[in-house]
Amino acid sequence: MMKTFKYLWSFGCLLWLPLWAMCQQPAPFKWNVLRVKGLLLSVPAAQDVPLLCRFIKEALVAEGVNTLALRIEYVYQFKSDPEVAERNSISETDLKQIVKACKDAGIRFIPTMNLLAHQSEQTEIGPLLKKYPQLDESPDYNPPVPWKDGGMFDFYSKCLCPLHPDLFKIIFPLMDELIDVCGADAFHVGLDEAWIIGYNKCPRCGGKDPAELFAGYVTALHQHLKEKKCQMWMWSDRLIDGKETNLLAWQASMNNTARAIDMIPKDIMICDWKYEDAPPTPGYFAIKGFQVLPSACAKTEVALAQLEQVYAARKNGLRADFSRTLAERMPGVFETMWVNTREFIDGYYNRKGVRKGTQDNVDAFKALFAEIRKKEKL
């Protein structure tokens, strides 16, 4: 009887072995199905939270959006540090309503903060540096009042000092609060347009290699988020050499931070914003080992050209295992909006009074996601 049982058991295992082996194989790679179909919006005014929640459930689902990043910044009533909140900030209840709307719609929600540059605006210092002026990388170098555009190589915005001993004990609780309230599994830390890093008069950073400073700061943020079981997202521009690529400032680095690309963890999601045209920089990040999301804004032709780069890389992923690995580093796109959220929603529904710039944003978003839906039907 025992021999019979062993025989039957062995025979059964042989029957199940092919099925088990099939289960171990990776799922068929579909070049036309994007894993990330993302959108960036600004945090709404408190009175517009219900409007955004309806828009998420109705319009974003219909468009095919599966990832929503919200630029919360300091427009939130932080319990961990109430004094850094902007005026008219949204509450925890407001934020949880937005998060719930995303969850109900099957949309991944990603909170977003600027954690290096953009600590000042045209005529005033931002809320973090107002309360903690010691974090200012360049306290002697302030925005002109009244503000004027000095060109692409002049002052832009204040930056935090990445080596200040108080920095992490101030910003980590803010990050943690948003992560916990949102139940987030990813966090966008910004890091774009950091023009003031390694400032020569900073007693901590002066004379140090800007690439090493930037890489050290990125790595510290990444480590903290890893401990929170959160994927780190960041903008791409400080990792691109503006001189070598001729992309110059704004969407690339002219302050010697680009070499940091070889010094930071590879599991960071790079959001490669390019708004004027579509240079092949997403492929650069993919070859370097990062996942990358081309990120357009208000130009439809740019958004569609970036999407074609993604599809071209993913089609080539059918050739070989290495190419497939490379293709999988192009998981989708991340359309960005820097306009008022209510105005964006009004533009989406073709309501009167919407500015042309906002309408251009809306039109690019619609065209991009219409093309994605078309490709997914192939």
Image: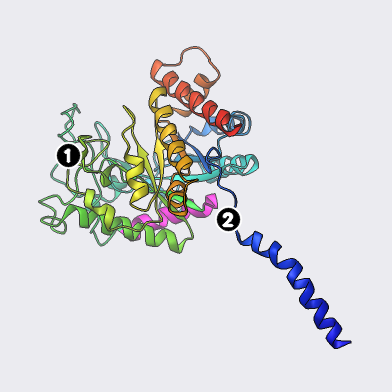
Structural crowding at the residue carrying mark 2, measured as other residues with C-alpha within 10 Å and reported as few (<14), some (14–19) or many (≥20): few
| Residue type for callout 2 | Pro
Q: Nearer the viewer, residue 9 or 139?
A: 9
Q: With 143 as the anchor, is 332 left or right in this view?
A: right
Image coords of residue 231 (percent x, y): 45, 54
Q: Does the magenta stretch include residue 295?
A: no
**Disc 1 residue crowd, few under 14, some 14–19, many 20+, Cα 10 Å:** some
In the picture, measured across the screen, residue 147 lies left or right of residue 32, that is left
Residue drawn where x is 42% and y is 23% of the image: 300
Q: Give the range drawn in magenta.
A: 168-184
Q: Which residue is drawn at 44% across and 37% down?
A: 312
Q: In this view, does 49 lie above or below 136?
A: above
Q: Which of 4 and 44 is in front in this view?
A: 4
Q: Position of residue 352 (x, y in %)?
A: 50, 12
What secondary structure is marked by label 1?
helix
Q: Name the residue under label 1.
A: 243
Question: Looking at the image, do the residues carrying marks 2 and 1 touch, with CB atoms under 8 Å apart?
Answer: no
Q: Quadrant of residue 112?
A: top left
Q: Image point 10% across, 51% down: which residue?
A: 200
User: Percent x, y for residue 48?
Assistant: 53, 30
Image disc number at residue 26: 2
Q: What element carries label 2?
A: loop
Please report the residue visible at 10 percent of the width from the left and 56 percent of the height from the top.
207
Count of marks, rendered view: 2
Secondary structure mostly seen in the magenta stretch: helix
Q: The C terminus lies in which quarter of the figure?
A: top right
Is 211 situated left or right of 185 in this image?
Answer: left
Q: What is the quadrant of residue 195 in the picture?
A: top left
